[in-house]
Image: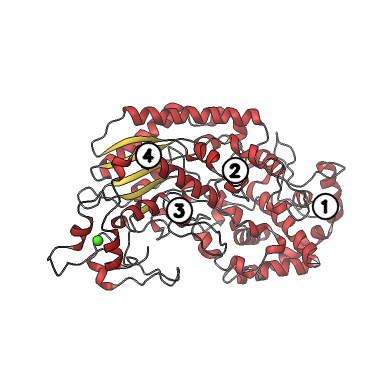
């Protein structure tokens, strides 16, 4: 069956798009062919550029592209290659734009009440006529929607998330994945809290844990939030024909299994400064890292419960998976940060589809009520304000998207219009209508106000609650580089690694300035801990 085969193709080569669909970050994606249409359009454009850059014909370009993939992806793609070539060769060789090609091939459709969407410039004769002409020429058969979610086996149980997300399991040996990390020493079985501080001081007979950590404010950090907290990131070189190389896809399986998220580099719980396949020159920077460096007894005590598409009323899908028990564990600093999906959920920026303030309030309270049953006493919860999405377009307007760099033909205006037309990503903010953007931002401020109210009025016994302004609001004024550097190049929506660093920097400045009493002083035993325990056994 053609449709089954194509599910396989797009499953494999559209990790970059299909996975976020599954994860709900590209909210909606049902209109006009949805994710299949988007995948077809982007890959048709990319294959064209491979032909152009390498002076290849269409078959060579497809072959070249599929050969970039490691096993087991490559084997699956090889089987499907003849079918791709049969289906695409004519259209790739034609003058049809990628948009026209994908409507012609049937992967994009015009649903009732909608119109043609285009990522590349509209052909002179218009989309409708161009598609009609191409269909007459290429005699393609219409296909069904190929992005049937049931065809995607990449749903990951949040409880299966590994050490990128939480550092609790000190029995895990990560040294083969992150070179330079020490294998976990079996002696450390005695290290019940996994912070790498264990054993007894032979001179005093006291546990090192008590001597070195006992008088300190010790915390684990627990992050509850969305794709910003998980650090959603699609490597931009995946869309640059001239940059494609096998190295780029070496760890595709790993990336896919991490849901296209990079929590180990996130502003809340990051602990590395770069990883394959992309090296980014910026220091390790996160609230966890700073909390840990302030007091090495906090080492490895981080949990990132964020997931793509999370909203106030869906975060409880992951919160119960946290590891924390009153009586056994140290208190937690909880960052609650739903930055925008309660807004983005709405199609076309329609307020009627956004989370109402009352429902938002009740959902936050439900989560807090749950935390009251799980968190150790003396914990602290920070409710983070929503993002001002109006910044995005004002920053990216007129710039070229990675897929449009080669021929200077796709700008972020085109991308945003396309997202808006497809009713995907975050139509309330990823559109070019500044009036609609501002309406959404005003609504976000209302929801931030709800968080402020809760922070000042709600009472719990095991934790206190504080409001943390969205770090972007301050950070955008502090950032000394180009503002576009703060935004993910591919999706044009999320904070980049630089943006994540900025979030961590600003949030830490606020925490140390206004909540120094919570954080406590630096641990004077840090040097002693390093002397005795080295790097404490990796993360
Ligand atoms: Ca310990």
Q: Residue at x 17, y 67 (%)?
A: 201
Q: What is the spatial separation of the Cα atoms under label 1 and label 3, in whole angstroms?
A: 46 Å
Residue toward you, 130 or 140: 130
Q: Which mark is residue 285?
A: 3
Based on the displayed image, in which of its 4 quarters is residue 44 positioned? bottom right
Q: Find the distance from the CA under tag 4 to the CA under tag 2.
A: 35 Å
Quarter of the image that includes the N terminus: bottom right
Q: Earlier in the sequence, mark 2 or mark 3?
A: 3
**x and y, in percent, of residue 447 in the image:** 46, 30
Q: Tags 1 and 3 in contact by the CB under 8 Å rule?
A: no
Q: Residues within 10 Å of mark 2 (few under 14, many from 20)?
A: many
Point out the tag, 4 or 2, that comes first from the N-terminus: 2
Residue 393 % position (x, y): 64, 38
Residue 480 in sight from this viewpoint: yes
- Alpha carbons under labels 3 and 4: distance apart: 18 Å
- Bin the neighbour count of mark 3 within 10 Å (Cα to Cα): few under 14, some 14-19, many 20 and up: many
Q: Which mark is first along the chain, 4 or 3? A: 3
* Label 4: element kind: helix
Q: CA distance from mark 2 to mark 3?
A: 27 Å
Q: Is 146 displayed left or right of 270 in the figure?
A: right
For marks 1 and 2, the one nearer the N-term is 1
Q: Which mark is residue 425?
A: 2
Q: Horizontal and vertical percent for residue 338?
A: 45, 40
Where residue 412 appears, x then y in whole percent? 69, 44
State the residue position of label 4.
513
Some atom of ligand 1 lies within 8 Å of the CB belonging to the residue at label 2: no
Disc 1 marks which residue?
Answer: 96
Label 2 residue SS:
loop
Q: Is mark 1 within 8 Å of ligand 1?
A: no
């Amino acid at each position: 069956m053609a449709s089954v085969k194509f599910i396989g193709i797009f499953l494999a080569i559209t990790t970059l798009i299909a996975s976020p669909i599954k994860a709900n970050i590209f909210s909606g994606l049902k209109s006009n062919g949805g994710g299949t249409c988007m995948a077809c359009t982007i890959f048709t454009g990319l294959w064209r550029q491979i032909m152009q850059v390498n002076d290849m014909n269409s078959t060579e370009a497809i072959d070249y592209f599929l050969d970039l993939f490691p096993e087991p992806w490559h084997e699956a793609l090889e089987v499907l290659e003849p079918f791709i070539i049969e289906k695409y060769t004519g259209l790739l060789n034609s003058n049809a734009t990628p948009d026209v090609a994908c409507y012609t091939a049937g992967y994009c459709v015009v649903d009732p009440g909608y119109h043609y969407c285009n990522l590349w410039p509209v052909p002179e004769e218009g989309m409708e006529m161009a598609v009609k002409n191409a269909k007459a020429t290429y005699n393609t058969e219409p296909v069904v929607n190929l992005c049937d979610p049931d065809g995607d086996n990449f749903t990951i149980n949040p409880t299966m998330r590994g050490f990128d997300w939480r550092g609790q399991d000190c029995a895990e040996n990560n040294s083969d994945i992150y070179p330079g990390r020490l294998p976990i020493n079996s002696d450390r079985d005695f290290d019940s809290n996994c912070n790498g501080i264990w054993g007894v001081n032979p001179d005093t007979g006291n546990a090192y844990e008590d001597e070195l950590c006992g008088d300190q404010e010790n915390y684990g950090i627990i992050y509850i939030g969305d794709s910003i907290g998980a650090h959603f990131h699609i490597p931009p070189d995946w869309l640059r024909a001239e940059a494609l190389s096998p190295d780029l896809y070496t760890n595709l399986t790993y990336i896919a299994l991490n849901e296209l998220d990079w929590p180990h580099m996130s502003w809340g719980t990051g602990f590395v400064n770069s990883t394959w396949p992309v090296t980014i020159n910026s220091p390790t920077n996160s609230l966890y890292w700073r909390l840990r460096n302030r007091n090495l007894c906090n080492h490895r005590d981080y949990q990132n419960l964020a997931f793509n598409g999370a909203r106030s009323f869906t975060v409880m899908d992951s919160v119960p998976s946290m590891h924390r028990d009153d009586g056994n564990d140290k208190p937690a600093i909880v960052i609650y940060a739903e930055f925008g999906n309660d807004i983005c959920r709405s199609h076309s920026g329609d307020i009627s589809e956004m989370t109402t303030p009352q429902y938002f309030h009740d959902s936050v309270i439900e989560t807090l009520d749950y935390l009251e049953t799980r968190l150790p006493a003396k914990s602290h919860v920070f409710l983070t304000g929503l993002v001002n999405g109006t910044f995005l377009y004002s920053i990216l307007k007129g710039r070229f998207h990675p897929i449009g760099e080669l021929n200077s033909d796709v700008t972020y205006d085109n991308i945003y219009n396309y997202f808006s037309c497809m009713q995907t990503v975050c139509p309330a903010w990823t559109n070019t209508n500044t009036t609609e953007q501002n309406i959404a931002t005003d609504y976000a401020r209302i929801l931030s106000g709800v968080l402020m109210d809760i922070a000042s009025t709600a009472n719990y016994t095991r934790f206190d609650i504080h409001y943390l302004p969205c770090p972007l609001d301050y950070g955008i004024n502090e950032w000394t580089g180009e503002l576009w550097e703060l935004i993910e190049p591919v999706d044009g929506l999320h904070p980049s690694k630089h943006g994540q660093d900025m979030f961590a920097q600003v949030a830490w400045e606020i925490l140390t300035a206004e909540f120094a009493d919570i954080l406590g002083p630096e641990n004077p035993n840090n040097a002693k801990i390093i002397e005795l325990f080295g790097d404490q056994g990796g993360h």
